[in-house]
């Protein structure tokens, strides 16, 4: 079985969940980065506490790995309430969510990850739940018979999605607060790496933390994952201390270059440049040549390539930029894949 990418912003099956959670901030004061999101949440939470009311329904969206789940737990911690977690893909019918709703106490948080994957029937069922905190039980099909309603405790629904555009307008409009999370800067990730290293008891200097941050694709989850890999390398190949040299050696061994690109990123760019003369090329065509799912490319590869300016999306398809040619060392107009060992 092929090893999963270290640079995927998704959680990996083999990752130690206890370590992951130990590194996550638990309060807004502990958060590094996402200043606008933190400030908006702080105001909303303080206002809700002053009125002794639940926080308005909250939608968190943005690329994977930026902290949507973490922020949902922080909101619950700041409000001093319980959080109940489920996934949109697991809620196949309205009855599947009833167990969660009936267990909610006043002010609790119901967190639905991947909320864009809710089936239409479940989504429509949630409308009256979000609007009036009631559920209807249609026990009769007779015309004119109004179904009885059951009153729920008022609560906060937090939805998280990487695809805000896939959420229907009626559902999106029921969220009182919508917050987009963006990629973190190298400076912010450097501080995150330092904080995580302290929690793990790993000696690291500023330049070692910065080297890890530069290759973390603007994503804290990746930064923490790379930190653990570099820690292992430092303990085996060095004296346990992480410096810039140690971080560079460890990450190059993992196939991650100084730009934060791995083999899949480079193959993507090579195919786009060498097979399609730099584009435009559709994601389905790239997917077929790379033998990777198109959704994987759209969610796990392209966001970072767009962020650092290596590709552009056009109505005709993806186009490689001059910067991509420069990074791969290819002259513009070259169509030879053999010079890169691609074919």
Image (spheres, helix red, strand yellow):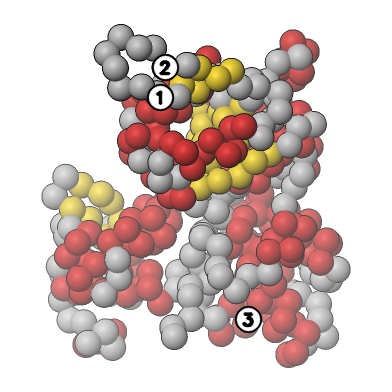
Does residue 84 appear to the left or right of 49 in the view shown? left
Query: Marks 1 and 3: CB-CB under 8 Å?
Result: no
Does residue 271 appear to the left or right of 70 in the view shown? left
Instruction: Kindly report the distance in space between the C-alpha atoms of the residues bearing marks 2 and 3.
Output: 63 Å
Q: Is residue 297 above or below residue 266?
A: above
Q: In which quarter of the image is the N terminus?
A: bottom left
Instruction: Kindly report the distance in space between the C-alpha atoms of the residues bearing marks 1 and 3.
Output: 63 Å
Q: Residue at x 58, y 39 (%)?
A: 99
Q: In this view, does 202 lie above or below 61?
A: below
Residue 133 position by quadrant: top right
Instruction: Kindly report the distance in space between the C-alpha atoms of the residues bearing marks 1 and 2.
Output: 7 Å
Pointer 2 local density, CA inside 10 Å: few below 14, some 14–19, many at least 20: few
Residue 300 position by quadrant: bottom left
Tell me the residue that label 3 is attached to.
250
Tell me the residue that label 1 is attached to.
139
Mark 2 and mark 3 lie on one chain; the one further toward the N terminus is: 2
Give the number of marks: 3
Mark 1 and mark 3 lie on one chain; the one further toward the N terminus is: 1
Q: Quadrant of the C terminus?
A: bottom left
Query: Marks 1 and 2: CB-CB under 8 Å?
Result: yes
Mark 1 and mark 2 lie on one chain; the one further toward the N terminus is: 1
**Which is nearer the eye, 304 or 310?**
304
Pointer 3 local density, CA inside 10 Å: few below 14, some 14–19, many at least 20: many
Query: Which numbered disc, 1 or 3, marks the residue closer to the eye?
Result: 1
Q: Is residue 233 above or below residue 78?
A: below
Query: Which numbered disc, 2 or 3, marks the residue closer to the eye?
Result: 2
Q: Element under label 3?
A: helix
């Amino acid at each position: 079985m092929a090893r999963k990418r270290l640079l995927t912003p998704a959680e990996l099956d083999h990752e130690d969940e206890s370590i992951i959670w130990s590194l996550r901030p638990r309060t807004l004061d502990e958060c590094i980065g996402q200043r606008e999101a933190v400030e908006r949440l702080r105001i909303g939470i303080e206002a809700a506490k002053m009125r002794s009311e639940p926080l308005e329904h909250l939608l968190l969206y943005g690329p994977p790995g930026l902290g949507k789940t973490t922020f949902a737990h922080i909101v619950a911690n700041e409000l001093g309430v319980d959080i109940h977690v489920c996934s949109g893909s697991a809620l196949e019918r309205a009855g599947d969510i009833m167990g969660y709703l009936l267990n909610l106490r006043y002010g609790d948080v119901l967190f639905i990850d991947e909320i864009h994957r809710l089936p239409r029937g479940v989504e429509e069922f949630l409308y009256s739940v979000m609007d009036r905190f009631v559920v209807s039980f249609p026990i009769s099909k007779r015309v004119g018979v109004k179904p009885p309603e059951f009153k729920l405790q008022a609560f906060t629904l937090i939805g998280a999605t990487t695809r805000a555009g896939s959420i229907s307008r009626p559902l999106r409009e029921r969220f009182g607060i919508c917050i987009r999370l963006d990629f973190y800067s190298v400076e912010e990730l450097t501080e995150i790496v330092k904080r995580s290293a302290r929690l793990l008891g790993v000696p690291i200097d500023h330049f070692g933390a910065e080297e890890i941050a530069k290759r973390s694709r603007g994503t804290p989850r990746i930064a923490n994952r790379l930190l653990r890999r570099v820690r292992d390398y430092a303990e085996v190949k060095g004296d346990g201390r992480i410096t810039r040299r140690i971080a560079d050696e460890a990450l190059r061994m993992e196939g991650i270059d100084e730009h934060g690109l791995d083999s899949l990123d480079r193959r993507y760019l090579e195919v786009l440049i060498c097979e399609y003369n730099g584009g435009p090329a559709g994601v389905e065509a790239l997917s077929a040549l790379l033998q990777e799912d198109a959704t994987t490319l759209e969610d796990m590869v392209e966001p970072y390539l767009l962020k650092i300016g290596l590709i552009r999306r056009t109505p005709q398809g993806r186009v490689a930029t001059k910067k991509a040619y420069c990074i791969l060392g290819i002259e513009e107009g070259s169509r030879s894949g053999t010079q890169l060992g691609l074919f």
